[in-house]
Image (cartoon, coloured by chain):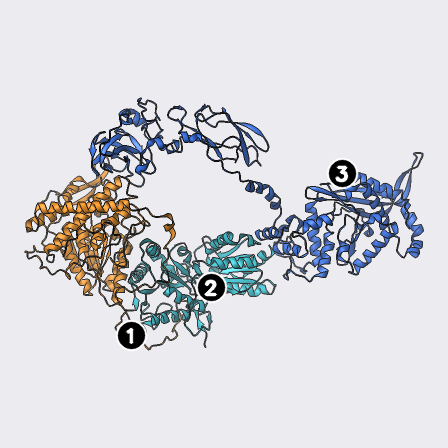
Chain colours: A orange, B blue, C cyan
Amino acid sequence: MPTRKSESSPSAPEVKQPHTNGSKAANAPAVKRPQPPIGKNPWGIPDWRLEQPPFHIESDWSGEEYRYKVVGDTNTPVPPLRPSKYLSKEQTLEIYRYMIINRQMEAALESMYKQSKVIGGLYLSLGQEATSVASAYALDRDDWLGPMIRNQGSMVVRGYEPSSAMMQYMAKGTSPTKGRDSGSHYGDPKKLNVIAPISHLGDSIGVLSGVALGARLQGREIACLAYIGDGGQSTGPTYEGFNFAAVRKLGVVLVVEHNSWAYSTPVELQFACKDLADRAIGYGVPGVIVDGTDANQVYDATHEAVERAHRGEGASIIEAKLMRMKGHAMHDAAVYVPSAVKEYWQRRDPIVRMEQYLKETGWMTEAQMKEVHAEVQRYMDQEREQAEAAPMPSPEEAGTDVYFDNGVDIPVKYGEVRVKQSNVGRKLSESSAPGHYK
Amino acid sequence: MPTNVVMPQMGESIFEGTITKWLKKPGDQVQRDEPLFEISTDKVDAEIPAPAAGVLTEIKIAEGTTVEINTVVAVIGEAGSQPVASSGSGSVTVDAAKEAKATAVATAPEGANEPVAAPGAQVSSTSGKEPSPSPADGDPANRGPEGAPGGASTGGTNVVMPQMGESIFEGTITKWLKKVGDTVQRDEPLFEISTDKVDAEIPAPAAGVLTEIKVPEGTTVEINTVVAVIGGSKSSAPAAAAPKPAAAAPSAPAPAATATQAAPAAAGTHDRIRSSPLVRRIAKDNNLDLSRISGTGMGGRITKNDALAFLAQGGAGSAAPAQTQSQPQAAAPVKAAAAAAQAPAAATSRPSTPAAAVAAPLPGELVPLSRMRGIIAERMVESKRTSAHVHTVFKVDMTRIVRLRDREKSKYEQRNGVKLTFMPFIAMAAVQCLRRMPIINASMEGNAIRYHQNINIGIAVALDWGLIVPVVKQAEERSFLGVARAIADLAARARAKKLKPEEVSGGTFTITNPGIFGEQFGTPVINQPESAILGVGGMFKEPTVITDADGVDSIAIRSIMRLTLGFDHRIIDGADAGKFMADMKKTLENWDGDIG
Amino acid sequence: MAAVTYLEAIRQAIWEEMERDSRVFVLGEDVAIYGGAFKVTEGFIHKFGMERVVDTPISEMAIASAAYGASLTGLRPVAEFQFMDFISSAHSQIVQILAKSNWRWGAPAPLVLRGPSGGGVSGGPFHSQNPEMFYVHTPGLKVIAPATARDAKGLMKSAIRDNNPVLFFEHKFLYRRVKEELPQEDYTIEIGKARVHREGRDLSVITYGAMLYTAQEAADLLAKEDIQLEIIDLRTLLPLDREAIRRTTEKTNRVLVLHEDTKTGGIAGEIAAIINEEAFDALDAPIARIAALDAPVPFSPPLEKAFLPQVGDVVREARRLVKY
């Protein structure tokens, strides 16, 4: 599995084919290391974490005003990563590099935002890189991704260059949506199989159910990876869309990014169950809890769910517990988050943890890691220059493409529609009963 | 190329930010994305990275100062650049700057170095707000008052061409009393204008420096056009408001849109006529004067069918004016009837409906208007709408003519084959009097009065199915007998529907005689485009005071008839009408003409 | 050949399209073995198999989402909403994702969302609505509302073959009430084209859906007074046939727009605006609107009758306009 380098032509407007990775392409042996035991939560949902944060948040009247208060211990030691059952060294290094791309891309975006180059809001995923990158890395090329606003890292794994996100955020005419939609709202139905997210939370989940249904009609069982946040999962469409997948045993893998804060609302005010993975029981699908700052856990759980989808066994839920280290958007300093909580998660930076893991496994030296950072920085500079130089859209593009040309044939993605039983010769006979009303 | 550093927008509803700390000082080298300064906004505090690598040449906004987003706060020059010595940053005290918060930032010249004490004074030395942060806009000297920060809208007062009367839509600037750069007081005369109605000296709407004259002397512009800008604040620091050189060159004045300005006046006439968009289009396409059509729609609205019917009668079209000039329009109902008689009904087969009656119809038979009825209705309404109708009634002692007629009528009929009626007397009297009073025998044509060469007397003839007005042409050349014969002939042929089109057109004066039914007098409607109509009342024996030659009064029974003149006051004044009618009275009472 | 009902015409269209094109499939509540609440898909599962006739949970959101997702893989789903009233439960999906899909990210969505709409059957406020205008106001969608069996079949075929999301508002009152002989051959009717249902001279009635028959009855009555109505059946509400609207306005110079949807925000306002833009100086009278009351659809028959436009309303208004 070659690590992608930054020598990719920065002027090439076309997005790359997604890599073919995950278990099917990986012939390297899995890491042979002893696996710590996997625990279960009180409802029997497997919990792969090596630690459970021993604190929670409460609303507290502190004499003059309300604020959030931490109850419990935030000073517990940081555990190592759980060794992956499936990832080879090369794959691990590739995930590592994608995580750095994810972070540097957002650092660049933050600078560009503060330099007034970014139009509109900017939503960052600092601290969430492991979940975005490692989950998307578990998909095959024919699988689909339904990202959320903070899954820029997943988009890069699918094959988008960082300049795509930058041009999106700068509203450039050469951005994937040609400047029509903002920020992370881009996608590609043809090659990269990424649903362009919308601002309405959960709406993509039912869409991915339909994608899986469409593929099944064409004889293919695919995995469709959808993300939802701890806040977004409160919406009806999340339930409606995922229930459809569960009922029809469609390969939707729902990664619930439990990043602890929905804008300013802590999870304690978002749902009453302890773990969102518990909801898998109600849906009738497998659920699992992972540490969202541990790329290995995220990958392994997603990989298993994807494999299950490919076998046609249906949907899964993965709850990744992590922390959004920035505010909701750039205007939000997230002062509502108690500093002890921030510090707890700062010590669990997914890239730092991964680097520790790479050192422990002996797969990389510090110097090599520094070189990866430097190489990504050079790549990012190229991407940034390309994005900044890109033209703004021409005004006449505002109202075009509202409809798709009827003269163009839309091909099927996976092949001819097949059915098991049918009665080809049957003729239409008049319908029997009148309907509801006279 | 220097790069401007601007106050970023840290959230959608954030419009200003405070610089809390500069992390670099002028002359320092900075790398791209290296932290340059710290800001604080309503929502967030942040460290702002440099947008480009180079030398920080200028800090424009001091620590502690709050400025609008996109305000240029510093400039990064290329490597090797020198810091700008006269930067405003060094001279602005924090206190003054705090006072300047949320105040429109005025322009100041480069090097305005004095500490500023007054609130509202400038904070930065160049425009604080820059809509486009592109480096090309970096040179503050290129920016005029419009580019002023936040103050773009508040920094100047527009001076507009005033509306000096309701129907005035434009004015000409005849003289500027101030020149660009002059300081003016509010209400101080600024320029002189000339309009259709008035010439006036226009006072300045605000105090300040005249920063721009947009419309030069001698130019006519629409009202409300901005003709000048008075810039700056009341304190009017002249240097601060120094106009850019380009401002002195007046921009091209907006061309006065004369066509649209003319429109309201013209449209005014149509507004009073109820029609529809379609009818107005038909009128335009066919050069129709809608005022000549009477509507059959609700409230007298002219409908499509009204317009088409009018056209079908040849009622207009481009030929109409010429026709009117050469040969005056016929009495309309007559002409219409004739047209109807000759051409098959063209327009519509759906039942026409009477005007009014919007509510639930009352029970009763609904009979469609006949062609003639429709035309009469249309013509009468049209006439009422067209002419300023005035009526004057004179009592005429017809005893002398009654006696003459009683004496002569049987012999006359034997001799001439035509009955001796009162009509030829009245007609002949009218011809004589019209000759002496040509304004009564005239028509209004646009803005002119046509005095007809001939006297063509229309005689209204009542029919069982309506009314028609045949015309005795060139009556002034006819004898009494000739007129009598013509009237009898036309009336007979009217009743037999034997009139020719030309016999019902071209009248210049009409006589109508409803008196045969016993009326005292009526108020007849003028037959357009004529200007007067004579209504003949009934003949009654009435006790009348007679004054003899000696001045002795006595009461006698006399044959009295009332004549009414309906006249168009647009061209006929009451005095003329009175003179004409007095003449008529005298002529008839002292009849001495030959009756042949 | 026997006359075919409006409902059977729709069944035939979907059936024939599924025979013709394996990419077409149906999904919705109770559409499979039961054959749909109004039996539009009865028997389909036996012919086409359970993969192509998909029962769904009761979630219009999921139905719309799944149809869209399947369309992204190149299929051409025909999704049934048991009643079009429930389209509101999928509103977000339709207006946010489907309608903007091609414009936003170049993802065409060839699908049909269909179902029964309209009143006159005492269905009450949640089974009688005409929700079409919410979607006519949404660029990116196409909105169809046929009035005749022939149009229903031809337009359904066009909708299925269209490369864009099409909302197909059937009228449940017409399902088994109107019938006509249909062409033997495969035919389509172009989306976006209105039809002159009846030629007339004095006044144009522009309408769609079940109100076509109200207009027709009124036209028959008025013909006795020598008032000749021209009736335009819009058939497609988005895109509107501006040309047909202009043409009939130029012809009769008087226009009455009639629809079963409520008045405020109904298509009549849009049509009046189009006439203003395209044929203002062809008008010989103001444009009149007859529509349902600005109220929810009532249940009880006398209330519903008062709510819906009636023949008498059309006759009265037509007389007034012709006199105007």
Quadrant where the C terminus of chain A is found in the figure: bottom left
**Residue B217: percent from the left, percent from the top?**
52, 30
Q: Which label lies toward us, 2 or 1?
A: 1
Chain under disc 3: B
Q: Is residue A103 at least partly visible in the picture?
A: no
Q: Are marks 2 and 1 on the same chain?
A: no
How much space separates mark 3 and mark 2, taking CA atoms?
67 Å
| Label 2 – label 1 distance at C-alpha | 37 Å
* Left or right: where B200 falls relative to A40: right
Is residue B24 found left or right of C227 in the rendered image? left
Say which mark, if any, is on residue B490: none
Q: Secondary structure at mark 2?
A: loop
Q: Which mark is residue B574?
A: 3
Left/right of residue C265 with respect to residue B453 in the rendered view? left
* Residue topped by disc 2: C210
Q: Quadrant of residue C135?
A: bottom left
**Amino acid type, residue under disc 2 in the picture:** Ala
Instruction: From the top left corner, tell me how far across and down residue A273 is, in percent.
Output: 20, 52
Q: Which mark is residue A422?
A: 1
**Looking at the image, residue A72 lies above or below residue B220:** below
Which amino acid does the dot numbered 3 rest on?
Answer: Gly
Q: Chain of mark 2?
A: C
The residue closer to the viewer here, C171 or C203, is: C203
Rendered residue at 22%/29% (across/down): B27
Mark 2 surroundings: few (<14), some (14-19) or many (≥20) residues within 10 A: many
